[in-house]
Amino acid sequence: MFKQDGGIDLINQRAKRILGFRRLKQIDQLVSLDPALPAVIRSLEPDEGTQIQVKDPESGDLVTLSLRATRFILQHESLTLVSFQNIQSELEAKESEAWQNLIRVLTHEIMNSVTPIASLAATANHILETLVHTSNEFSTASEPVRDVKEAVQTIASRSQGLLKFVDSYRKLTRIPKPDFRIVPIKELFGHVVPLMSPKMQEKGIRFCHNVEPETLEITADPNLIEQVLINLLQNAVDWSDANPSAEVTLRGCLGKASRPVIQVSDNGPGIEKEAMEKIFIPFFTTKQDGSGIGLSISRQIMRLHGGSISVQSTPGTETVFTLKF
């Protein structure tokens, strides 16, 4: 709640956490969070709402705040009460739901169209094979017959390839509900590290892993979280491949507010700013042979756990993916 001169009369602890301030006396102090924020707050009309993107003071990630203002008179003085709400998780949930609905429709229609084509192509190929072996009029040495056979085989092969491709995207809509239990992070690492170490050694990548404190636990579905970690570590391996002094680190620790955190970091080429804003979007990939679903699935898994996944990257120096529980 602030006065007409911008002086803050009252602010609760929740607002301080959202804004990242221990003490806040003037609206203008919010320029450190976002240069436009003080002006946005001052310009709010009674019962008017707006949204603004700012950096989360804890993680440094961009989050969306919903602002709403109410004005009233108290002891002959005009005051404005502004409510702040971090709606980033709600926006991400809506975005994820929209993508899943789109993927369901697209994959359903594509599967319905391609499946009979694949079946007919396989049948036609079988008929041609039979005719070649049973009729003197058909011979693989005949150029027209050979061309038709190759064309049918290509259709069959590409149809099967397209079906497998589409089926991989259906995984985005088939993530099982987590089977929660208390899991020591050290136990998770004990399953993931032996799987990834041979790949690291083969490519000459130094692989470091540690948990501090060693007794650190999370409430999670271990199978789903292991899937996320394997995906992140595989990405780190792929991007560190060309670095002769490549290093990948898997770390478990306590973050701010004593929340358990798992981080996967590498010293690869990093992620450009333009790509950073898109890497969790389904189908987006910076790899030539990437599918664009790994990080999308990882984000959905973390959301099902009531947590989050974020990334910080300095091109040419370091990339860090952080899982918060």
Image: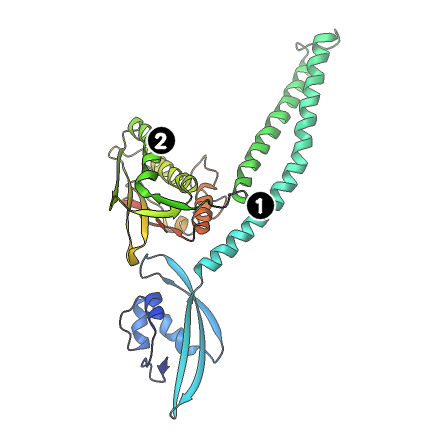
Classify residue 256 as left or right of residue 293: left
| Residue occupying the point 40% across, 45% down | 181
Q: Which mark is residue 233?
A: none
Q: Quadrant of residue 6?
A: bottom left
Nearer-the-camera pick, 185 or 115: 185
Residue at screen point 43% across, 78% down: 43
Q: Position of residue 59 (x, y in %)?
A: 32, 56
**Where is residue 237 shown, x and y percent of the image?**
34, 35
Q: Earlier in the sequence, mark 2 or mark 1?
A: 1
- Image side of residue 155 versus residue 232, left or right: right
Q: CA distance from mark 2 to mark 1?
A: 31 Å
Q: Secondary structure at mark 1?
A: helix
Residue 116 in the image: above or below residue 300: above
Q: Which mark is residue 103?
A: 1
Residue behind mark 2: 195
Badge 2 element: helix
- Between tags 2 and 1, which lies in front? 2
